[in-house]
């Protein structure tokens, strides 16, 4: 079967034709291409086919592809099926399902994702942590914080970033002690996490870190984060106008003076 046939079906939103190719199982490579084409179909009926394949298809490569597509489509009605596929026998399918839920960013997915933090496969745990960071619900913090001391540096790194995304006082307290770790990759993630938390306490921590670290790359990163936090303090309107705080204050006083004289007339 020619790939151009799949392209034609996709362009004409021929769900029936694509479904026939997928169900035939005669051309494994074309099945994959037909499933990929579903990602670009606007028809809601494409969802039903993707969900069916996610739940019932024997080939794990197709199941994980369907999970990926459902995440890309950001279809909330796919959430229950994705929750179910977090228990798939194939680790890659579980990981891709967590990745899909990361794109949907719904708090209803927090508890199912928390259950994955004990998965035997590190790739699955890693994707679950990333997803929880994307959802940014602080109910996940108590389960994430212990992972900052996980045996795997990969888990430590994604956890530091995820906790930073969630933010808040508890995140700050969890990340601060890790500013003394020796592993530069982990420390970089901790700095980035703190940058996400932001606020005056973080700025003080970063300034102190810049003063005492011997690592030039980490020092540069900390300075970059400090500059980023400083820029966030500047109101957007002020940025667009290119005016300093002093200019705006003078303009404000001028307007008040004009209003005062107008009221006296």
Image: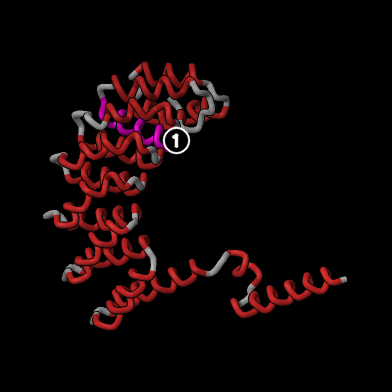
Q: Which range is magenta?
A: 59-72
Residue farthest to the front, as pictured: 264
Picture quarter containing residue 116? top left
Q: Nearer the viewer, residue 170 or 13?
A: 170
The answer to whether 225 is drawn above or below residue 18 in the figure is below
Nearest the viewer among 94 and 177 is: 177
Q: Quadrant of residue 108?
A: top left
Q: How many marks?
A: 1
- Image coords of residue 191 (percent x, y): 30, 67
Please give the residue where the numbered disc 1 appears in the rendered image: 74
Q: Is residue 61 magenta?
A: yes
Residue at the image point whose x is 46% and y is 28% from the top: 38
Mark 1 crowd level (few <14, some 14–19, many ≥20, 10 Å Cα): some
Instruction: Residue 163: say if magenta.
Output: no
Q: Quadrant of the N terminus?
A: top left
39 horizontally vs 258: left or right: left
Which residue shows up at 39% across the image and 27% down it?
78
Q: Quadrant of the C terminus?
A: bottom right
Is residue 96 among what the camera can see? no
Name which residue lies at 38% across and 70% down.
200
Residue 61 left/right relative to 44: left
Residue 91 quadrant? top left
Q: Is disc 1 placed on a helix, strand or loop?
A: loop
Residue 138 is situated, as x and y percent measured from the top left of the image, at: 31, 48
Query: Which residue is pictured at 33% across the width and 56% down the height?
Result: 168
Q: Position of residue 63 (x, y in %)?
A: 30, 28
Asked if residue 63 can be seen in this view, the reply is: yes
Q: Indicate whether 95 appears above or below 42.
A: below
């Amino acid at each position: 079967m020619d790939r151009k046939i799949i392209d034609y079906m996709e362009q004409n939103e021929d769900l029936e034709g694509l479904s026939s190719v997928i169900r035939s199982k005669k051309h494994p490579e074309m099945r994959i291409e037909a499933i990929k084409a579903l990602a670009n179909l606007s028809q809601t009926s494409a969802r039903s086919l993707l969900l069916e394949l996610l739940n019932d298809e024997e080939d794990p490569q197709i199941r994980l592809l369907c999970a990926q597509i459902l995440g890309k489509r950001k279809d909330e009605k796919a959430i229950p099926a994705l929750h179910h596929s977090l228990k798939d026998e194939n680790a890659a399918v579980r990981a891709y399902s967590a990745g899909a839920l990361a794109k949907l960013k719904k708090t209803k997915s927090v508890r199912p994702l928390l259950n994955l933090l004990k998965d035997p496969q590190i790739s699955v745990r890693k994707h679950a942590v990333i997803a929880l960071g994307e959802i940014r619900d602080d109910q996940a913090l108590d389960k994430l914080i212990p992972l900052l001391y996980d045996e795997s540096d990969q888990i430590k790194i994604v956890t530091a970033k995820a906790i930073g995304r969630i933010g808040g006082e508890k995140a700050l307290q969890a990340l601060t002690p890790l500013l003394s770790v020796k592993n530069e990759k982990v420390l970089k993630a901790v700095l980035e996490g703190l940058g996400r938390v932001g606020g005056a306490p973080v700025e003080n921590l970063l300034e102190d870190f810049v003063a005492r670290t011997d690592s030039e790359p980490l020092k540069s990163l900390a300075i970059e984060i400090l500059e980023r936090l400083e820029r966030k303090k500047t109101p957007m309107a002020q940025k667009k106008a290119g005016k300093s705080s002093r200019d705006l204050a003078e303009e404000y006083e001028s307007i008040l003076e004009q209003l005062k004289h107008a009221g006296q007339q």
